[in-house]
Amino acid sequence: MVDASKLFLNKPDVGVKTYIIVPVEAADSLLDELVRKSLVEPIPLQEAAKEFEKIKTDVDMATRTSRLVDELSKRLPRTVEVEIKELPWDTSEALKKLLVELEEVYKTVQALEIELGRVGDSIEKALAVEKLVESLSSSGVRDLVLDYEGPYLVIKTLYGGREEVEKLEQYVVRALAKLDTGSGKTIAIFLFERSVFENIRSQVSRLEVVFEPIRSGDPGRILAEARRLRGELEARAAGLRDRISELLLSKSYEIGLAKVLSETLLAKIGVVREALESKYLTVIAGWTLRSRLDEVRRIASRFKGSVIAEESQEPPVEFNNLKPFKPFELFTEIMGYPSPSEWDPTPLLTYLYLTFFALMFPDVGYGLGLIIGSRLVLPYFVENRETLDKLLKIATYAGITGIVTGILSGSFFGSLLGVYISSVIPPVLPSLPPRLGQPEDIGVAILSYIGLALGVGYFVVSFSHGIGLAKNAKLRNWNGVLFESIIILLMISSPPAIKTVLGFNIDILGLERIAPGDVWVKISIGSFISYSIIKSVLDRPFGVLLWIFDILGVMADVLSFVRIAGIAVGSAIMAELLNSMIVGAVASTVSLSILGFVIGFLLAITLHMINLGLSSISPFVHSLRLIMYEVSSKFYEGGGRRINPVGPKSFVVRIGGE
C-alpha cells in the first residue's frame, strides 16, 4: 500500500554515515560492487581522517562514560528502572553533554562522600569514647580527664590501629586507660611529659580524639555528652546519605540514558576502531541512502564484511517520489533539495503545476500539438538524456491536462473544431464566442476567466499558508504559527469584509450566511492591526517595516494569478483571429471544393502550429513561477544537499554533421 505522504508532501530519502568493515583482501571486490550499483558516496580522504579521529575520541568518551555510569549506579540506594523512549539522533553530541553533566554530579557525590567519611570517623571515635568511659565508670573512676595540656604534663586520648597506639605508648609517662574496641582498633588515655610530647606532636595529632565540650569531668556527664554528640553526627551522616541518594535518583534518567548511549556507541564504532587498528581489516566510509542500507548490508555480508550506520548532522538526501512525480523533481531542484527534516513538495507542486498549465492552455488541438511537437523539437535542444526524458514527460502530462480543459471549455483549435465538442459537451470553463462574436460576449468571457483565476489564486495561496502553519507547528516555531494563523484569518475574513464595505460580490465562501458582514469587517481590521503590532514587537527591528509587505504580499500573491486568465484569453483570442483568417481565405478561394478544403487544412495547421509555438512557452514559464513564488515560498526552504554516489556514468555526445 502506498504511503499517503508520497501523494502530497513527501519525505526525502536521507543519507546515513556508513562504515563497512571488511577483510583487506576482499576490499577491492566489495568496492567494485558498491560502485557498480552506485550505493555509496565516499567521504573525502581529509574528511575521512577527521571522522576516524572522531571515532577514536568517541570510543574514549563512551568508555569514560561507561565507567562513570558504573560508579554512579553502584551508589544508587535501590534498583531503578528507567524507560528511554527515544534516543537523540546525534548520539555522540548527546553523550558528550551527558558526560559533562554526570561528571559534575560525580564530583558533588565525591565531595559529599568525603564529608560523610569524616563524619563517620567522628562517629567511630565517639563510640570508642563511650566504651572507654563506660569501662572506667564501671571500675569506680569518679573523675576523668580526656584532654589536658599543662606546662609540664600533657594528657591525650588517642584512637587508632592497635599497632599505631602501641607505638606511641613507648613515649608516655603512664597509660591512664586503654581499651581494645574490636576490629583491630584501640582507644587509650596517655600521660606525656611536655618536652616529649612536643617532639611527637604530629604523630599524636593523627590519632587524637578531640571533643571540645567533654575534655574532662564526671564520667556520667562525659558519657551523656558523647552520646549526644554521636546522635548529632549520625543525624548529619544520615542527611549526607539522603543528599547523595536524592541527587543520584534525580539523575537516574540521565544515568540510564548515558548507559544506553555509551553502550550503543561502543557497539557501533568500537568495532570500527578495532578495524582501524588491525592489519587484517579495513574500513570503507561513506554516505548511503537509508532506503538502500539493507542492500549494502547484503553485499557486504557476501564479502564477510559488516556494516555500521549512524545518523549524522547535515546528511545528504535524495528525492523519494513515486514514478509519476519524478519528472517534476526538476522544478523542486531549481529551488534546492529538501533538507533532511523538510517536506519534499514535489507531489503537491505536480498537481498545482498541471492545474495552472491546463487553465492557461485549454485547447484539445494545442494539447495534442504539445505532446507531438515536444518529441520532435526538444531532442535538438536538450543533450542530457535524463533531463530530456523528464521534460518530455512533463510536456506529455501538460498536454493531456490541456486536452481535458480544452474539452471542458469546448476548444479544439479554438472554435474551428471546438464547436463540435460544444455541441456534445456544454462548456464548463469560460470560453470566447466563435470567431470572437460580439464585444459584450468577449467581455463576459474575459471577466469570467479573471474571476476563475482569482478564485484559484485565493484558495491556493490560503492553502499554501496553511502548509506554512503546519510546518511551523512541526518545528515548534510558535512565532511562525502565530503569524501564519493571523494571515489565514485575514484571508478568510477579507472577502466578506470587502463585499460589505465596497460592494464587490467576492464572498466565495459564503461566510455572510454564518455572520453579518459587519462582524467580518471587525475581524478583518482586528487581524490587520494585530499582525502589525505582533510583527513589530516579535521581529524587531525590521518587523516595524516588514509587516506591511507581508499583508500586501498576500494580496499580490492572489492577484498574481490573473496571469492565468491573461495567458489563456490571449492565446484564445489569437486562435479565433486565425480561425477568422482561415475561414475567410477558404471562402474567397473556392467554396466547398477539394482545393478549398486542402487550402483550409494547410492554413489551419500552419497558423495554429505557429500560435502553438508562441503560446506554449508562457504557460510553462508562468506555471513554474506560480509554484515557486506564490506556493513554495510559504513553506519550502530547500537547504539540503543531494547525495552523489560513485557509480558508472553515461554520456551522450553528438559527432559528425556540421
Image (cartoon, helix red, strand yellow):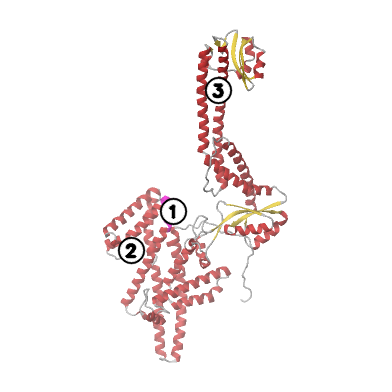
On screen, residue 37 versus residue 236, left or right, reads right
Q: Which residues are magenta?
A: 467-480
- Mark found first going from the N terminus, 1 or 3: 3
Query: Disc 1 or disc 3, which is closer to the eye?
Result: 3
Q: Nearer the viewer, residue 521 or 89?
A: 89
Percent position (x, y) of residue 563? 40, 68
Label 3 neighbour load within 10 Å: few <14, some 14-19, many 20+: many
Query: Secondary structure under badge 2?
Result: loop
At label 1, the amino acid type is: Asn
The crowding category of the residue bearing disc 1, from other C-alpha atoms within 10 Å (few below 14, some 14 to 19, many at least 20), is some
Query: Residue 332 in the image: x percent, y percent?
Result: 50, 62
474 part of magenta stretch: yes
Q: Residue furthest front?
A: 138
Q: How many marks?
A: 3
For label 3, the residue is: 123
In 3D space, how far apart are the residues under numbered discs 1 and 3 (Cα atoms)? Answer: 61 Å
The tag on residue 509 is 2
Quadrant of residue 511 within the rendered picture: bottom left
Tag in front: 2 or 3: 3
Q: Element type at marker 1?
A: helix
Foreground of the two, 4 or 503? 4
Q: Which mark is residue 472?
A: 1
Q: Residue at x 49, y 71 (%)?
A: 397
Q: Nearer the viewer, residue 334 or 406?
A: 406
Residue 626 is labelled as none
Q: Quadrant of residue 138?
A: top right
> Looking at the picture, which amino acid does disc 3 mark?
Ile
Q: Gap in Å between the C-alphas at discs 2 and 1?
A: 26 Å
Asked if the residue under mark 3 is in contact with the one under mark 1, i.e. CB atoms within 8 Å, the reply is no
Q: Secondary structure at mark 3?
A: helix
Name above or below for residue 124 compared with residue 549. above
When the figure is inspected, residue 523 is found, relative to residue 146, above or below; the finding is: below
